[in-house]
Amino acid sequence: MEALTIHEAAQTTGWTPRMLRYIERIGLIEPARTESGYRQYGAGELQRLRTLRELLAEHEIGLGDVAFALRLRRDEALSGAVDSWLEAEPQRPEAVSADEWLRWEQEKHARIIAALTTNEPMETAA
Amino acid sequence: MEALTIHEAAQTTGWTPRMLRYIERIGLIEPARTESGYRQYGAGELQRLRTLRELLAEHEIGLGDVAFALRLRRDEALSGAVDSWLEAEPQRPEAVSADEWLRWEQEKHARIIAALTTNEPMETAA
DNA sequence: CCAACCTTGACACAGCTTTGATAAGGTTGT
DNA sequence: ACAACCTTATCAAAGCTGTGTCAAGGTTGG
């Protein structure tokens, strides 16, 4: 059939056998195995190995980045947490007039000390 | 309307000033600046800095991972390319329940459509 | 039964990431 | 005016990534 060994798959895809094992280890492409444990690369895996090279080359990303994207896709708790962190708009202090600012500056140290001594975690995000 | 300097923000969030600059450099949290260039951390940014710490701690990810997720979110061409590569994944998540799998399949189609409508269609590589 | 594959594991090394420390210089409050 | 901040830039060290190579041993096919 059309299952290639690791060296053959490496030759036809441009990776090295070493890198095919690495790619498998980080969860990106996990080929089937024979009874005795030999990796078998099928047509689909060869295709994915080639497009993986293109993906990395065209977008300046690394294997670890793709692995993280895969992890995001598989772990909904993770992707939800990351997404909600990213979605929180970075609300900046709006530009303020000079004397308002001055008043704030005069009180800020007291405010910091208050925040530190009360040690109150403001968990409620707006 | 609150804004702390970098050292104050570091104290209240548990980061170091060095790390706040690094977090800014990788695009995660970019505080406003005063006229003379001082960073101003507002309440929203302080909150995000704290939740960022939680995010990293609870999910065993790094700042680089969050930065990549942000890049995915901002670069539709990139996220489309990564998503379609991941879509072609041959192995199925057997560890999830049937309706989780179904929901995933449904979301997958939505993601593909979103990627295709915001970008050029991907050609079939040969 | 032997050559030529395959397996895992380990050592190694360049380069990048993450983080700290320090320097040279500008800003600000008192 | 001076202390105590801030800025950027640079050097440095620890750790991770990506990759090669080698060793010890199992599998396969003529």
Image: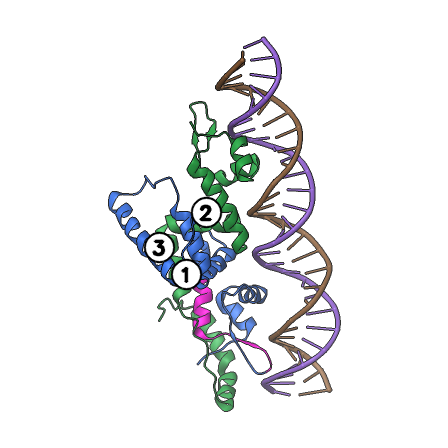
Chain colours: A green, B blue, C purple, D brown
Residue with the mark numbered 1: B119
Residue with the mark numbered 2: B125
**Looking at the image, is mark 2 or mark 1 earlier in the sequence?**
1
The CA span between labels 3 and 1 is 11 Å
Element class at badge 2:
loop
Q: Nearer the viewer, residue A67 or B30?
A: A67
> In the visual, does B45 lie left or right of B116?
right
Label 3 Cα neighbours within 10 Å, binned few <14 / some 14-19 / many ≥20? some
Label 1 Cα neighbours within 10 Å, binned few <14 / some 14-19 / many ≥20? some
Q: Position of residue C26 (x, y in %)?
A: 67, 81
Amino acid on which the number 2 mark rests in the picture: Ala
Nearer the observer: mark 3 or 2; the answer is 2
Q: Mark 2 and mark 1, same subunit? A: yes
Element class at badge 1:
loop
Element class at badge 3:
helix
Tally the marks: 3
Question: Which of the 4 quarters of the picture holds residue A34?
Answer: top left
The CA span between labels 2 and 1 is 17 Å
Q: Nearer the viewer, residue B70 or A4?
A: A4
